[in-house]
């Protein structure tokens, strides 16, 4: 493991003796042996006594010095262990008597007094600058700073690092050291100060070493150096600094300035390389919680075969099931399955990827996920029968009106404190209840979920606007092997479609005029139908749903095809088409078919549009960025806010949501095959170049390139709220990224010569997404425009894409009949039993309710969707509060202000569109306005707001 080191200049100082007279106006030099130094800095003797001995020695050398009021410094050349590097002697300036008299009050065992102003320099008469360092620490969970246990506060050793080499020796200049002392503290943070005397030959400070002398980690917010020419120098840290007893490596923090690798100041080049080597690690051993190592591994930690053989899950990542890589934890393998990694209570992520004290502690992801897990366990004790469905629709309404009584468990109150929207105390009752807030969709239209128009509208303005695609070929055919899955041609015929279009046009004309659209979950789901049907309490079909674009730009549902392949017990392929009907039987079959399609869409939304395309695909970008781009790199500075907290969210998801028997597996139709199905989608559908919004729309046939149209695209559906607002946001992001990239890369040669940047892009393609390294869709990285495209795509995925599929979840799925996550029973016309037919004929509502999620499934999912849709009180929104580094350069600062201004304009444009009655897919009686891509939001479940990163 690389170790930071700093070299000190060779200092030649005369050794004073008692025989030689000493000029009182000259520095007195005392040479301390290694033995004395060991006693001074590492022994268990009181530093107070040691300091007295030093003072006594000075007085004995020249008694009149004790009475002197001169401020001229006295030099103590100190050797190891105080200096780093090669053990050269270091001149340590100490104020004379007035200051020395104060040592007694502030010195501590084994520490240099904080009252000593320190400068590592040879004896010289050069002019000294008095520099003050102000260090800000954030209060950490449990109030660590107030309970630190050391009078006077946390001990930090600071070392200033010069940005330049010594012009005479060509070596790195010695660091300047000093200890901090507490200045002030409040409930949220504490400030510490340290004073340095810096020779004018030291040059510009390029970095600072920090060593945490305490035995617990601290959260370091920033360090401000004041006393140099010009404005104070701010060093943004926002990082956990572990105790030196856990990790002896000193932490290095660079100033906020950006440097391409070739432009790195000479005094910082070694540190730049060493810091990256530390972050990469050596790929060995189990990671410790305080480490900051970024490395790759496959998804082999979703199952838990040691607890139950049925909880074994396939490894995602590799030739059989290609998948993006996750962060390596190094946990031991399972005893019963050497391919699986064992699970523990906590999952390692690099320390600075975890929620910081800056993020509101009451809304940290770890806390909320833990609470939801506890809530799910509470529900298990209340709803004993996991298969129990809702007997009436009124029972579903009771979730919002009366709620579910929670058991009087010990410490139950913390649920209410952390989930106040969900857990409420009933007056005159000793129990808390889980009572859901009524979603906005239900408030506006009690029967919205029944409507075919709303069913179609949500494909364009709901929480999964990524699935609708243009029909370009007819008849529809499957690409699966007909010998295994049955006849490939769809059962949706020309006659069916033209009957439903009711004379508007022929199918041929509709396809030519781009009027036919489809949700296609046929080929992706069909291979899993027989597997899923072997699981208890669920079923599955392959499905196709067709829509017709009407003259008023709304979609009309035409037909749903459900398909079951040939079964293992010899049953032939079964497929049937359902259409909207005026007859009672046809109408209920249509509603049941919609429930199945909505369950398919819910599963695809959660597993592919949401998890795979945002959370999962982004993690390799984060790992590569930290391994290959220095914190000084301008692209690191640009991407950093868009990657904040995502790795912790993903680790928590592997622990609670997507793990074996987690909420996804237990509540969504694919069951235990859910994550495997997402791997198949990655293999067959995911391409990097299709993750940007324009290319995504083009690939689905929803847009074509047109230089004369807004955004350079002509939409196939003009009133497509997600695309309309998304393209405005995409353009704003691209303009900002273009301004930024152009500033640092004015010509292609700088792209080609940037070794860090090239290594970063290579590692993303060949390691992080290495299973698809030979697939199409990876752009070259040769020009500034290539880089703009790559960065804009990443920023869009972490901000706009994620916001569009995440923050409306409770609004649209909080009332689960609108988006059931699972269909538990097959259609009553597929190989029906007499009992199934009788129930359907006598009371079709019961058949539909039985198909819907069970009570325990619905309440668990509703609770998690409420949490996932929530904005914390201190959410960081796109275009707000730029990173400190972005303020350093006036041109970048101006470009960011322009970007922020465009986002504010976007707010107004969206508000205006939502009141324009021409846009029927986003406005009208009972319709929830489309606000998912409005950049800003207040806290809570609001259905709007675009954070920088995937932070929930």
Image (cartoon, helix red, strand yellow):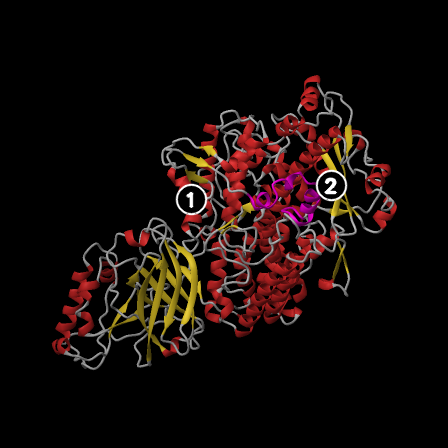
In three-dimensional space, the C-alpha distance between marks 2 and 1, rounded to whole angstroms, equals 40 Å
Magenta-colored segment: predominant secondary structure? helix
Above or below for 729 versus 677: below
Q: Where is residue 753 in the image (x, y as percent from the top left)?
A: 62, 67
Q: Position of residue 224 (x, y in %)?
A: 38, 68
Quarter of the image where one finds residue 71 = bottom left
User: Could you tell me which secondary element the residue under label 1 belongs to?
Assistant: helix
Q: Which residue is pictured at 65% across the width and 69% down the height? A: 749
Q: Label 2 neighbourhood size at 10 Å, few (<14), some (14-19), many (20+)?
A: many
Above or below for 138 versus 612: below
Quarter of the image where one finds residue 160 = bottom left
User: Could you tell me which secondary element the residue under label 2 belongs to?
Assistant: strand
Number of the label disc, if any, that sits on residue 520: 2
Magenta highlight range: 439-465
Does the magenta segment cover residue 115? no
Q: Position of residue 612 (x, y in %)?
A: 61, 45
Number of the label disc, if any, that sits on residue 418: 1
Q: Can residue 286 be seen in this view?
A: no
């Amino acid at each position: 493991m690389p170790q930071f080191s700093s070299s000190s200049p060779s200092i030649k100082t005369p050794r004073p003796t008692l025989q030689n007279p000493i000029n009182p106006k000259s520095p007195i030099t005392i040479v301390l042996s290694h033995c004395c130094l060991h006693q001074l800095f590492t022994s268990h003797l009181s530093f107070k006594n040691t300091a007295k001995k030093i003072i006594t020695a000075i007085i004995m050398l020249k008694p009149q010095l004790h009475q002197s009021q001169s401020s001229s410094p006295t030099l103590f050349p100190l050797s190891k262990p105080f200096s780093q590097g090669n053990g050269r002697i270091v001149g340590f300036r100490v104020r004379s008597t007035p200051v020395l008299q104060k040592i007694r009050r502030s010195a501590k065992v084994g520490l240099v007094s904080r009252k000593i102003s320190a400068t590592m320099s040879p004896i010289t008469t050069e002019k000294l600058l008095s520099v003050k360092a102000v260090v800000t620490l954030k209060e950490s969970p449990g109030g660590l700073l107030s309970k630190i246990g050391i009078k006077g506060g946390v001990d930090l050793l600071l070392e200033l690092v010069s940005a330049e080499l010594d012009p005479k020796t060509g070596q790195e200049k010695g660091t300047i050291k000093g200890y901090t002392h507490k200045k002030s503290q409040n409930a949220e943070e504490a400030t510490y100060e340290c004073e340095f005397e810096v020779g004018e030959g030291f040059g510009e400070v390029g970095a600072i070493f920090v060593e945490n002398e305490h035995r617990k980690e601290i959260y370091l917010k920033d360090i401000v150096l004041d006393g140099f020419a010009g404005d104070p120098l701010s060093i943004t840290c926002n990082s956990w600094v572990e105790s030196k007893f856990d990790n002896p490596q000193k932490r290095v923090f660079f100033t906020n300035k950006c440097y391409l690798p070739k432009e790195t100041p000479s005094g910082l080049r070694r540190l730049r390389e060493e810091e990256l080597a530390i972050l990469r690690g050596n790929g060995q051993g189990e990671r410790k919680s305080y480490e900051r190592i970024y490395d790759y591994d496959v998804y082999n930690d979703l199952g838990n075969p040691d607890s139950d053989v049925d909880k074994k899950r396939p490894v995602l990542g590799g030739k059989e099931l290609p998948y993006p890589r996750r962060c390596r934890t190094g946990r031991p393998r399972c005893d019963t399955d050497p391919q699986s990694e064992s699970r523990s209570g906590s999952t390692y992520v690099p320390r600075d990827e975890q929620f910081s004290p800056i993020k509101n502690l009451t809304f940290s992801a770890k806390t909320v996920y833990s609470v939801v897990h506890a809530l799910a366990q509470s529900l298990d004790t209340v709803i004993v029968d996991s298969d129990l469905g809702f007997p009436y629709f009124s029972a579903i309404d009771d979730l919002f009106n009366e709620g579910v009584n929670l058991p009087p468990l010990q410490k139950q109150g913390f649920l209410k404190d952390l989930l106040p929207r969900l857990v409420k105390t009933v007056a005159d009752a000793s129990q808390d209840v889980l009572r859901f807030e009524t979603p906005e969709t239900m408030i506006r239209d009690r029967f919205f979920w029944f409507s075919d128009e709303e069913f179609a509208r949500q494909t364009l303005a709901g929480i999964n606007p990524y699935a609708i695609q243009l029909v370009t070929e007819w008849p529809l055919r499957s690409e699966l092997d007909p010998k295994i899955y049955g006849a490939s041609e769809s059962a949706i015929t020309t006659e069916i479609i033209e009957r439903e279009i009711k004379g508007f046009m022929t199918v041929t004309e509709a396809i030519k005029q781009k009027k036919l659209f489809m949700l296609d979950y046929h080929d992706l789901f069909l291979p899993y139908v027989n597997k899923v049907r072997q699981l208890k309490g669920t079923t599955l079909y392959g499905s196709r749903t067709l829509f017709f674009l009407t003259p008023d730009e709304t979609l009309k549902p035409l037909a749903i095809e459900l398909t079951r392949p040939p079964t293992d017990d010899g049953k032939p392929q079964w497929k049937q088409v359902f259409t909207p009907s005026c007859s009672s039987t046809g109408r209920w079959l249509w509603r049941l078919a919609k429930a199945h399609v909505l369950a398919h869409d819910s599963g695809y939304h959660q597993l592919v549009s949401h998890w795979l395309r945002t959370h999962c695909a982004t993690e390799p970008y984060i790992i590569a960025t930290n391994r290959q781009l220095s914190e000084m790199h301008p692209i690191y500075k640009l991407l950093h806010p868009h990657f904040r907290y995502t790795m912790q969210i993903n680790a928590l998801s592997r622990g609670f949501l997507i793990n074996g028997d987690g909420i996804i597996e237990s509540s969504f139709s694919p069951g235990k095959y859910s994550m495997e199905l997402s791997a198949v989608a990655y293999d067959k559908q995911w391409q990097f170049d299709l993750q940007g919004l324009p290319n995504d729309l083009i690939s689905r046939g929803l847009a074509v390139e047109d230089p004369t149209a807004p955004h350079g695209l002509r939409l196939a559906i003009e009133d497509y709220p997600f695309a309309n607002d998304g393209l405005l946001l995409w353009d704003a992001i691209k303009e900002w990224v273009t301004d930024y990239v152009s500033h640092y890369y004015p010509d292609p040669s700088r792209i080609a010569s940037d070794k860090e940047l090239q290594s970063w892009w290579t590692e993303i393609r060949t390691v992080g997404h290495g299973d698809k390294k030979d697939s199409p869709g990876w752009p070259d990285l040769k020009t500034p425009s290539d880089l703009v495209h790559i960065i804009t795509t990443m920023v869009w995925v972490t901000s706009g894409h994620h916001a569009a599929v995440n923050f409306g979840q409770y609004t649209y799925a909080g009332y689960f009949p609108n988006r059931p996550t699972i269909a538990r029973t097959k259609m009553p016309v597929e190989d029906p039993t007499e009992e199934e037919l009788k129930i359907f004929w006598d009371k079709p509502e019961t058949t539909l309710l039985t198909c819907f999620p069970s009570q325990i499934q619905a309440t668990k999912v509703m609770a998690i969707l409420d949490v996932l849709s929530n904005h914390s009180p201190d959410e960081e929104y796109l275009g707000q509060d730029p990173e400190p580094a972005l303020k350093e350069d006036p041109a970048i600062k101006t470009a960011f202000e322009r970007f922020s201004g465009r986002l504010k304009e976007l707010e107004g444009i969206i508000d205006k569109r939502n009141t324009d009655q021409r846009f029927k897919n986003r406005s009208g009686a009972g319709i929830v306005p489309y606000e998912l891509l409005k950049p800003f939001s207040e806290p809570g479940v609001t259905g709007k707001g675009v954070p920088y990163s995937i932070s929930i």
